[in-house]
Amino acid sequence: MSKNPIILGIETSCDETAVSIIQDHESGTPKILSNIVSSQFDIHKEFGGVVPELAARSHVEKINLIAKKALNESGININEISAVAATAGPGLIICLSVGLNFGKALATSLDIPFIGVNHLEGHALSPKLHTKISYPYLVLLISGGHSQFLSVNGLGKYKRLGTTIDDALGEAFDKTAKLLGIEFPGGSKLEKFAEMGNPNKFELPKPIINKGGCNLSFAGLKTAILRIAKNINSDEERRDLAASFQKTIEQIIYIKSKNAINDFLKNNSIEENYFVVAGGVAANKGIRNKLIKLSNESNFKVIFPDLHLCGDNAAMIALVGLEKYRIKMFDDIGLEASPRLPLDKNADFLKGSGIKY
């Protein structure tokens, strides 16, 4: 095994075609040699959401080009690559299959190890791309498809403390933005729209806020937004509703994160506590500010991935590949894509949640 292995990572779980090349470094923080992300916003814009068949077709058309671009930008020769890592799940299976099959074919042609990566693990470990952090640490993963609290106890060792019992936070942002007439992709634009509104105009529900530990629920909030949106007619009211939604989300995340911190501390007694916030919604400034405040109050060091690493990207997939490469944790090329691939396979969000059904 080379002294400073070079890993090529591939990510095609949804609507980003991404390839990244990273290299291990003596500092303990890998060097990102290239990180190319090709978005499909224009393709899905007219549909107001991701169309799986169109997303997969775009991956097929772009993956080879994006890989070549990543290689050119990295300045390395393809034969210098030590291993290929690709997202195996969770995600849209027809999209996952494109990157996974490309990765397996590339690894086979180069006669180097292939490593399948859990997309969620990529997000959970992503701070390691720019920050030295030791296990265990607490993670809040908030994205378009996932919302959960995890105790990260080591590579491949994850305990889920709480999750959404219905919709992901990113989905709640996207659906609310759509109801308010914000152009796709609206979730990332909603916060800026909300800055022009009155956050106290509408009193919105906070589902299971006082029960369920650090489990989350956003379906009831989305329903309330739908009901109110049908009866507003002015741009001012739309901005007020957006601001009220943003404020409500911040309050929910603050309280649920506080519960997660308490749960984490019950099972861990360490000198320095870390709270990592990852996933696309981690770019939301209002949520960031709330969690910085909570972390200061709780004596935790909060860590956010760099903004360009919050959303789906291949650098985080290459990072997990590097971590697995170090301990020779390789996969067979027969590995199949999995649309549902939890980090904590033993987790049951109903068990012990305190929620009555």
Image: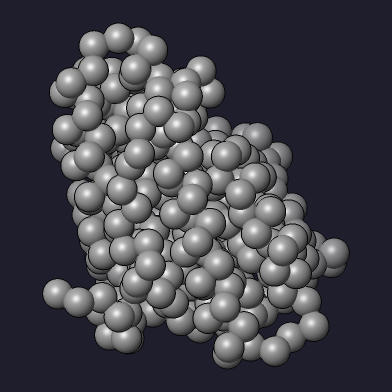
Residue 231 visible in image:
yes
Q: Quadrant of the C terminus?
A: bottom left
Considering every residue shown, the one lying at the far right of the view is: 27
Q: Could you say where residue 64 lies in the image, as x and y percent from the top left?
A: 41, 38
Lateral position of residue 208 relative to residue 113, left or right: left
Q: Quadrant of residue 349?
A: bottom left
| Most foreground residue, 312 or 322 | 312
Q: Quadrant of residue 352?
A: bottom left
Q: Residue at x 49, y 50 (%)?
A: 251
Question: In the image, residue 187 lies at what x, y percent?
Answer: 39, 33
Q: Nearer the viewer, residue 214 or 84?
A: 214
Q: Residue at x 43, y 44 (%)?
A: 248
Name which quarter of the figure residue 242 lies in.
Answer: top left
| Quadrant of the image containing the N terminus | bottom right
Where in the figure is residue 183, as x and y percent of width and height? 33, 18
Which residue is nearer to you in this view: 126 or 191? 191
Number of disc labels: 0
For the point 30% across and 33% down, the residue is 176
